[in-house]
Amino acid sequence: MTAKRQIHLGLFLQGAGHHVSGWRHPNAEAGSENFDLLRRVAQEAEKAKFDMIFLADGLTSGVDAHPSMIARFEPLTLLSALAMVTERIGLAATASTTYGEPYHLARAFSSIDHLSHGRAAWNIVTTSYARTANNFSKSHPEHDERYAVAQEFVDVVRGLWDSWDDDAFPKNKESGVYADPNKVHVLDHVGKYFSVKGPLNIPRSPQGHPVLIQAGSSGPGQDLAARTADIVFTAQQSLGEAQAFYKSLKERVAKFGRNPNGVAVMPGFLPVVGRTLAEASEKLIELDKWTDVVGALPLLEERLGHSLSGYDLDGPLPDLPISDQLRSRAELLTALARRENLTIRQLALRVAAGRGHHMIIGTAEDIANRMQEWFENGAADGFNVMPPYFPGGLEEFNAQVVPILQERGLYRRDYVGTTLRDHLGLTRPNLPA
Amino acid sequence: MTAKRQIHLGLFLQGAGHHVSGWRHPNAEAGSENFDLLRRVAQEAEKAKFDMIFLADGLTSGVDAHPSMIARFEPLTLLSALAMVTERIGLAATASTTYGEPYHLARAFSSIDHLSHGRAAWNIVTTSYARTANNFSKSHPEHDERYAVAQEFVDVVRGLWDSWDDDAFPKNKESGVYADPNKVHVLDHVGKYFSVKGPLNIPRSPQGHPVLIQAGSSGPGQDLAARTADIVFTAQQSLGEAQAFYKSLKERVAKFGRNPNGVAVMPGFLPVVGRTLAEASEKLIELDKWTDVVGALPLLEERLGHSLSGYDLDGPLPDLPISDQLRSRAELLTALARRENLTIRQLALRVAAGRGHHMIIGTAEDIANRMQEWFENGAADGFNVMPPYFPGGLEEFNAQVVPILQERGLYRRDYVGTTLRDHLGLTRPNLPA
Ligand SMILES: Cc1cc2nc3c(=O)[nH]c(=O)nc-3n(C[C@H](O)[C@H](O)[C@H](O)COP(=O)(O)O)c2cc1C
Ligand SMILES: Cc1cc2nc3c(=O)[nH]c(=O)nc-3n(C[C@H](O)[C@H](O)[C@H](O)COP(=O)(O)O)c2cc1C
């Protein structure tokens, strides 16, 4: 971390916006495969000095999904394209340890780290939805086994990233030595889930290891983060919940012998900005008005891992066992419904707006205050910003909220280094001795 | 195909050059992870109006490999980056059906097709080398089974590319219809090797289907090409062998009920250009002089699928059973050694120079003549050009050979269309009724 602690910002980029009806807003340009929009948004985030752009992912589709997730670019090819049209901002993409191969992933992220001169990050997920298995000729492992696989997967990837010394490729025309045979490290991994010999077929990348992000907040999820991650992406509703999560996570980091200051906790953060509170509220009411509760219901059911058919939409959320699909999110939404006494309809609308992430409706001042509050009270080291619609929602945030954070000295006015590790104040990992 | 039949050109791009010592040439900029070089070379190929850039691939590494293959970019992320710095040239990358998932590949190539506005192509390979399995926690299927898997894999990918009608995403802000539920097609594939439900989570791409290239020239390889490919990449040594392959392939295409003119046969073609024949020969002698036969031997052994240790380097190639690793290449090299009475050392040097592809040493005139001869005599519809070193080898080819082909009306002076299908004279596939 840098000398003076500052807020880290990710831009969670989803073409159609984060609010389920965001794409219908007048300042939205709907488009899942609209690269021109994504390019402009990424450049806009870079102008505002965000640490990184963040791409989520999923491996299924269906017309009842969130519009940003029915159809979209494959994140690694998209990231690589974005690397060509930006210069300093970090570039993070989600990839699953349940439906991939460590050799392929290690290679692709290393490749993007080379192409972007040290700006790549991998958001490690285990994939929630069991129906994903139908697209991959296999069955979906249960929750805790997914995390056991993930631990080994990440270890293999990190091992592969250390296949070559930094000076392994002298490419000396005179001596004829292209690669130095003494500077290669064969991994020879044989584990419970993977056997991977190595070496990786790409030189060690500018960051040594691309930055690791972990998203998944259950106990096993936190353990994976504590052992391996540089950034933790999480959904937290209230200050209290966020503080508890922050504390739990940092304690686990210490337990694994790592420095808690070296791991940034970044909750999702959905800002609805208005010049007045009334204007901001009006904006959300409008977005909600466009939202078909019947269409929003599958998004809620997916997160709970249970069908709600047969229940009264205007009645309370029934008592349902916590499903293992998306364990931490199911817990969060159940707690939210109980705390605020929400009906199923109301809860579905909340999910439609922010999928369980913290949403704040207010003036730029209100929003900056909330960020400062979480940042200064052990709830967050930064935020993954989720504009309800693109590009308008980001433009408003950048024009109105960012300058306040900068004036308060809470957020950078310019990049200091060139790599994502530089932005995060992280050093480049050495090769194991 | 276009009205007047013209030669199609691919640029087979390998950072360190095709000749094993190409990277040591004064006009070479060695660099596997040197994106700046690759960008300039791609732009140079586009200036010369090549149909496409072609990226090979492999899923292993080792210091005894060809320098272009010890370390390199992951091809799909590289292709995506190249899409951003070029405008018209086609973009082909190799990906294996033995070590991948159809859902991932269908998605990534569709994504690149969107990002490049219709310039993507997939070179389908089954992966030759058994040691690849060591990086993927599995065992290497034998030759013919690899092709059986490949057939099903390609069918699934094509099915996934047809998941959505072209107008499936009205994104109508007023009606609120983002995706039209009547315009999605669920694949529901259940086969011998794969079960893939679909739909794919990306809209149908500009080319409908990215262009399909097939590389692998055995009988099962040709059948796969004949059923599915738009382009066939092959290694052929002599005019006679190339004619026999061309005839065999086109007959198989007809047998599968497809139009033989819709499939372009493009052998690899390694030009060593000089202002005189003597200058060209001198160039090759220099490259060969830098070549360590002991270093070249593994490249030969790999292609034969047999160790040659214990044999006299200056003796004849022993009688070895044809291995199933790289069946067609082993046959080609064995035939070459017999025909020209080559010693092991001489054969290893040939492999070091062109890996079994057709090499021609001469003036620009000689080279253009040879291309015309193959093109007009039923041996080739185009060539995958393999400069011995980069960027010099391509610059010479473009400056000296391309203008001759253009003057003779054998090759385009400018692009007519915008997609790779346009360059190849192929129509966009309709969705199955
Ligand atoms: C903030 C957050 C973001 C996530 N993003 C993704 C994602 O983009 N793709 C995905 O497949 N899963 C994503 N997940 C799901 C996790 O990978 C995991 O499968 C799921 O949360 C269950 O684990 P948990 O109980 O530890 O949260 C996310 C989870 C969280 C908490
Ligand atoms: C011209 C040509 C190029 C090839 N390029 C690749 C490649 O880039 N990567 C790869 O793994 N295999 C490549 N192959 C190998 C094939 O995928 C296949 O595994 C091998 O050739 C054995 O099949 P065959 O006997 O049909 O040729 C290539 C084969 C040929 C003929």
Image (spheres, coloured by chain):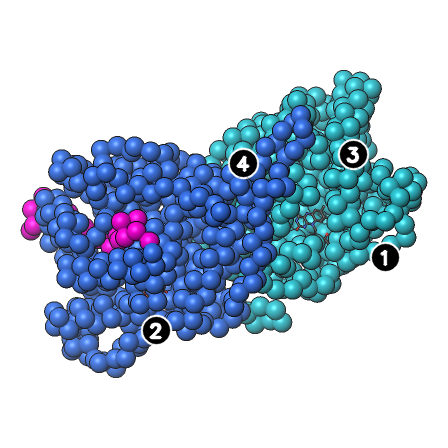
Chain colours: A cyan, B blue
Q: Amino acid at mark 1?
A: Pro
Ligand 2 falls in which quarter? bottom left
| Left or right side of A293 for A98 | left
Q: Are marks 1 and 4 on the same chain?
A: no
Q: CA distance from mark 3 to mark 4?
A: 34 Å
Asked if labels 2 and 4 touch by Cβ distance under 8 angstroms, the answer is no
How many residues crowd mark 2 within 10 Å: few (<14), some (14–19), many (20+)? some
Q: Residue at x 75, y 32 (%)?
A: A291
Q: Are marks 1 and 3 on the same chain?
A: yes
Q: Residue at x 48, y 41 (%)?
A: B205
Q: Residue at x 71, y 24 (%)?
A: A401
Magenta stretch encompasses residue B268: yes
Circle 3 or circle 2, nearest the eye: 2
- Which residues, given as a range, are shown in magenta? B258-279
Tag 3 secondary structure? strand
Instruction: Depth check: give the residue in front, B67 or A344.
Output: A344
The quarter holding residue B236 reads: bottom left
Image mark for residue B167: 4
How many residues crowd mark 1 within 10 Å: few (<14), some (14–19), many (20+)? few
Asked if labels 4 and 1 touch by Cβ distance under 8 angstroms, the answer is no
Circle 1 or circle 3, nearest the eye: 1
- Check the residue under mark 4 and report the chain it is in: B
Tag 2 secondary structure? loop
Q: Amino acid at mark 4?
A: Asp
Instruction: Say above or below: B392 vs A146.
Output: above
Q: CA distance from mark 4 to mark 2?
A: 45 Å
| Badge 4 or badge 2: first in the primary sequence | 4
Image mark for residue A321: 1
Query: Which residue is denoted by mark 3 in the rendering?
Result: A359
Circle 1 or circle 4, nearest the eye: 4
